[in-house]
Amino acid sequence: MGKGVNIDGMLVTWGDRLFYPGNRVVKGSPPPKLTGDALRRHAAVIRRRIEATVVRRAPQVMVKVTGGGRGMRAIAAHFRYVSRNGRLDIEDDRGETFNGAHAVRALADDWRFSGGLIPEEAADGGQREAFNIMLSMPRGTDPLAVQRAAREFARFELAGHKYVMVLHDHQANPHAHISVRAEARDGRRLNPRKADLHRWRETFAGKLRELGVEAEASRQAVRGSHRRPEVLWRIKARAEGRVDSQLQHVEGPAPAGSLSGRSALWPTWRLMALALASSGERSDERLASAIERFVDARGQVGLAVEKMQPAAQCSVEPPRR
């Protein structure tokens, strides 16, 4: 690259495209450009996320909305299910902990009348009065760290809402179940969308890292992975009890038919490697080599698609932010 090229600026531009897709401007005025110390700090964050993804293969967090009740009967049933009918500790948004079947019934009564009345049975097509969220980490993660990170996640992302949390540490993957009342105390309603889920993953991963637990929240497309859909025979066999109900979907290299979004990211990885290799820093050169190995290992099919569609490749000029 030419003399005087701003390597940190390139890393931030292309790194935001990979790791923070919500930051990309679609409409309206672009955000102010980072300069000086702010630019260097953000570039350092991008370098750490690159290393976590392509070198250490940091564990990926999972944040999933597993459902939500439209009536109090369904909400109370979920309380009983996640708490094992009160045998597991339940923590609420005030930080208070309780257990026992009586406490679970009292919790349901409290939610029923806190704010707008939640009917026992919802009308057909009625709005959700609660959302059930699961925050999970892979096997081997400290369950107490998952609990603490989930607690801080809820305080940050669900502020103003009533919610309860239960830790499940008796299964392979430690995870926390959070039930949140859709209506906030000021009347606003929670309505999570895809962008919210990505932000929630980022928040949960950040809270884990603050506790010293390595965690990442990069998208499957960025990692060159694909969550293979479960075949119909296995779904039916599980329903009939003929296979292990704990079997999970498998992540692996993306198949050729699913690369329309993934293949467009490989040029971005390559451009970041080129920028890092040109910085003159040994640590950046090593990171550039790691990116090349990562792309070679995960993106063979994607690179083949790019050769067939050269117009889709990125220019060497940094994309506009």
Image (spheres, rainbow, N blue to C red):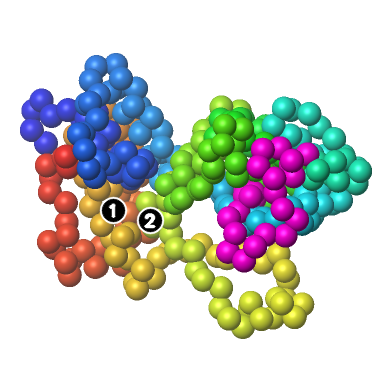
- Magenta stretch: residue 111 in it? yes
Image location (x, y in percent) of residue 213: 59, 34
The total number of labels drawn is 2
Give how far apart the Cα atoms at labels 1 and 2 are: 8 Å
Residue of label 1:
265
Name the mark on residue 221: 2
Image location (x, y in percent) of residue 227: 49, 64
Report the magenta residues as a range: 110-134
Residue at the spot 62% in from the left edge and 66% down from the top edge = 124
Residue at the spot 75% in from the left edge and 56% down from the top edge = 120
Q: Earlier in the sequence, mark 1 or mark 2?
A: 2
Q: Quadrant of the C terminus?
A: top left
Q: Is residue 91 visible?
A: yes
Q: Is mark 2 on a helix, strand or loop?
A: helix
Return the residue found at the far left: 2
Image location (x, y in percent) of residue 252: 47, 64
Q: What element carries label 1?
A: helix
Tell me which amino acid carries mark 2.
Ala
Give the dominant element type of the magenta stretch: helix, strand or loop.
loop
Return the residue found at the far bottom: 233
In the displayed structure image, the side of residue 147 where residue 257 appears, left or right: left
